[in-house]
Image (spheres, rainbow, N blue to C red):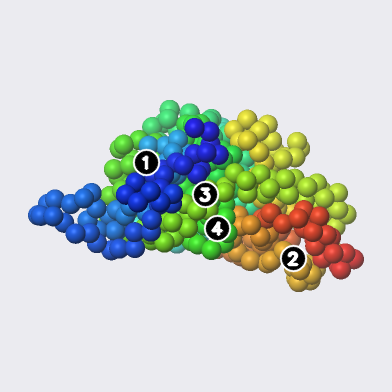
Amino acid sequence: MEFQSLLIHGGIDGDEHTGAVNVPIYQTSTYRQSSLGVNSGYEYSRTGNPTREALEKLISQLEDGYKGFAFASGMAATTAVLMLFKGGDKILMSSNVYGGTFRVLDKVFERFNLQYELVDTSDIKDVENKITENVKAIFIETPTNPLMTITDIRKISDLAKRHNILTIVDNTFMTPYLQKPIELGGDIVVHSATKYLGGHSDLIAGLAVVNSEELAEKLHFIQNSTGGVLNPFDSWLLIRGIKTLSVRMDRHIENAKYTAEFLAKHPLIEKVYYPGFENHNGYEIHKKQAKAAGAMISFTLRKEVNINKFFKGLKLISLGESLGGVESLISHPATMTHASIPYEIRQKIGITDNLVRLSIGIENKEDLVKDINNALQGEK
């Protein structure tokens, strides 16, 4: 089955009991047991729920993994994955990773002595030099949030296997429609499914997919023990969102290319970070491991632009957290998504105060560039 069809018919396709073409919402906390120790396969919805199970099977198929898991948020999924490790272990992590991932390691797991180090994962030699005896995983985003740094998933995975450590890939920006980390050697894939997979800014969800029975058993134990599961209704909403992923992403990508080209030529834009440009660092690597550039763009404004007035000048594009919805969203990483990262680190890795991150929606592309241009022209 081709991917576009799998989006609609993958996982559990409809309801065999009634013939309904959609998986029902099993809005229940518990299940009747016929006798002691005998049940229908479900006993309590924290442990397993048919609607959530349909979603988990779907994302596992889409990512070509062994088993999938659905959580109450992207950070809940990431947190559960980090719980696979113990105190004294160390994680190497992409240097401009999402601020929430940095925060949970720096402020929460640090209390339990789970260590981390920020590394430029696009530099394979640098990564290898940082692997010590206590390093147990390499956590990468590619492209990274927000600087769109590209990491070679295959090379990182091969390096990790040589050292008997895990490769974890946050695939939120690309989705399995554009990039499949497990095919490239990754062990675990995580998603903030709130973003492109849901696609409509109407739910919070996280997904994780593993490549082996051993990891599946460990992660299911953590999911069931800690309880950060996705509820049945949001599981159903997410399945519905995933059905239109390919058609939405195609429009996102078309609009992003058009907008990025506009920004690159604008005199008030200093620099554009977009994996679709041939001069973008890692362009050839990204082209090899992903089907398209995606729909995220970051750019820096020239000093003469008042960033606050620029944001206020936007009428169609909303200033807000998150990304990946049908509507375009713009954010200021230094004070929003990456505010938890210390100022010195932000400056060092390039998350400067004039950096803007843009999530391109599926509106009319001419309307989008007109909105940006009007906001910029108001600053001349």
Quarter of the view holding residue 206: bottom left
Quarter of the view holding residue 137: top left
Q: Quadrant of the C terminus?
A: bottom right
Which residue in the structure is indicated by mark 3? 242
Three-letter code for the amino acid on which mark 1 is drawn? Lys
Three-letter code for the amino acid on which mark 4 is drawn? Gly
**What residue is shown at x 24% (from left), y 53% (from top)?**
42
Q: In this view, does 71 lie to the left or right of 256?
A: left
Three-letter code for the amino acid on which mark 2 is drawn? Leu
Report if residue 254 is visible in the image.
yes
Which residue in the structure is indicated by mark 4? 99
In the displayed structure, 309 sits above or below 31; it is below
Whole-angstrom CA distance, mark 4 to mark 2, is 26 Å
Asked whether disc 4 touches disc 2, contact meaning CB atoms under 8 Å apart, the reply is: no
Report if residue 141 is visible in the image.
no
234 or 138: nearer the viewer: 234
In the displayed structure, 208 sits above or below 302; it is above
- Of labels 4 and 1, earlier in sequence is 1
Q: Is residue 138 left or right of residue 120?
A: left
Which residue in the structure is indicated by mark 2? 316
Whole-angstrom CA distance, mark 4 to mark 1, is 27 Å
Q: In this view, does 44 lie to the left or right of 353?
A: left
Measuring from the top left, give residue 237's x and y in whole percent: 47, 58
- Residue 266 is tagged as none
**Of the two numbered discs 4 and 3 in the rendering, the one whose residue sits closer to the viewer:** 3
Mark 2 residue crowding within 10 angstroms, few (<14) / some (14–19) / many (20+): some
